[in-house]
Image (spheres, rainbow, N blue to C red):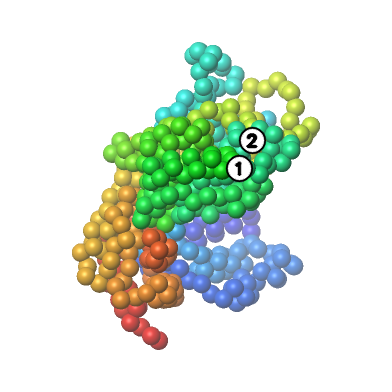
Amino acid sequence: MTTRDDMDIVRSRLESWEAEARMERAPVLVQPPMSRLAEDLDLGGLIASGGLTGGRLEAFLETYLAASHRIPHPHGMGHQVACPHPSAILGGYVDVFTNNPMAIYEMGPAAATVEYAVVNWMLEKVGWTPRPWPDRPSGKGRGEVCGGGVLTHGGSLAQLTALAAARAHADPEAWENGVSPDLVVVSPPDAHYSVSRALGILGIGQKALVSAPCDGCGRIVPSELDRLLDDLGRRGRKVMAVTANAGCTAAGLYDDFHAVADVCERHGAWLHVDGAHGASALLSPRLRHLLDGVERADSLIWDAHKMMRTPGLCAAVLFRDGRHLDGAFRQQASYLFHEKEQTGFDAIAHTVECTKAGLGVKFFFGLAAEGEEGLARYVEGRYALGAEAARLIASREEYELAVEPQANIVCFRLRGLDDDGHLELRNRVLADGRYYITTTAFAGRRWLRLAIMNPETELRHVEGLLNLLPELAKNDT
């Protein structure tokens, strides 16, 4: 067997797996016991002796794909993971095949150039000034502030990078001397866990995380935030950053960025927006109002692998003033960081990663295939289906809707079930295998949660789930 023969086997099996999912001929999820799956895949034997080619490769893929979450399945409404655009998958193949780790320009000029271009495009979508090409000085005024940003392997690294820059802004000596003990970060209680994780990594400590005052749906109340920052100042605490949500993880809701920015400006506080999921509404003229005022933030994260149909992982961390990115990571490595003449841009000084994949390539391939308008239609369609699903749920007496959705995330409950009952119901959905959903804590209660990501998911698929849930809830076997 040749490599080309094996490639044909892989292509054929993947095509069959995708077709089975799209045509709803297979369960969306099967979870065999891990030890049995390892035996069925013959992991130990293959590691010891090799031979993953030809018929053995085909048998391996048969087992592997049967136990893989079928992302293309219209019944998959679980986590916020993209159903990748076919062209974005090709971009991923080009990146893997060329294997150009492009954090240093000379190691991947084409990939670095593509990333630079897509980051500039994202900066413009936010309302910030894009960077000039490194080999072409800007023709605009010398005093003009340009934005900046990089792509990272996931939103958690993007979050860490943004908060590292905020730390450098608030405490410039922290990199050399350690973090000042008076720093705090103010964040909504429902913020993504990567915020508190970043504080631990950065040496600030999770005890420095102060809960922002929020309404019953978890959105920041600006007037109370103003009083909180006043109180923190009187107690000698320095606010390193205030974080706000553009599509919070639990329910996909948006904060009032103009009002929060007003408060942050009065107190000289850095405003960071977690737009990992919801920033993609910037693509749509109909939805952009959800992010009014986001251009006043100091930093923003925006995941392409959520609502821009890009395979994981690909997340942007963006800055209104690109100079702040320079302060996020300061270190010495003479074989990498040194003065040199070049025509490109080294991202390595601005990322946690030293070896970084060409993340912008797969992102660009999908974007270039659909164009801005095509991706905007996709985002609009998924948000519209979220609203339709909410109306359907609200019309059914057996269900309770948590909140009118602003995005494609819908939270609801089956009346008569307590929180533990909803956790058990979700377990029964997974065991059944026909649908994939999650649960979340929201407004002090446990809810079933839909994240409608697949472009082929329709209202009839949601209706089928709603018809199934009462049956599973009654099933005690």
The image quarter in which residue 57 lies: bottom right
Residue located beneath label 1 in the image: 183
Q: Position of residue 9 (x, y in %)?
A: 54, 59
Q: On the picture, is 440 further left or further right than 64?
A: left
- Kind of residue at badge 1: Leu
Contact? badges 1 and 2 (CB < 8 Å): yes
In front of the other: 285 or 456: 285
The image quarter in which residue 448 lies: bottom left
Q: Secondary structure at mark 2?
A: loop
Measured Cα–Cα span from mark 1 to mark 2: 8 Å
Rendered residue at 74%/38% (across/down): 177
Extreme residue toward the front, this view: 234
Q: On the picture, is 252 further left or further right than 117?
A: left
Question: Quarter of the image containing the C terminus?
Answer: bottom left
Using the rendered image of the protein, determine whether residue 183 is visible from the camera's viewpoint. Answer: yes
Q: Position of residue 326 (x, y in %)?
A: 63, 30
Relative vertical location of residue 438 with respect to residue 347 in this rendering, above or below: below
Q: Position of residue 208 (x, y in %)?
A: 59, 49
Q: What is the crowding at mark 1: few (fewer than 14 residues within 10 Å), some, or many (at least 20)?
A: some
Rendered residue at 34%/41% (across/down): 290
Q: What is the crowding at mark 2: few (fewer than 14 residues within 10 Å), some, or many (at least 20)?
A: some
Rendered residue at 73%/22% (across/down): 340
Residue located beneath label 2 in the image: 171
Question: Quarter of the image containing the N terminus?
Answer: bottom right
Rendered residue at 46%/35% (across/down): 264
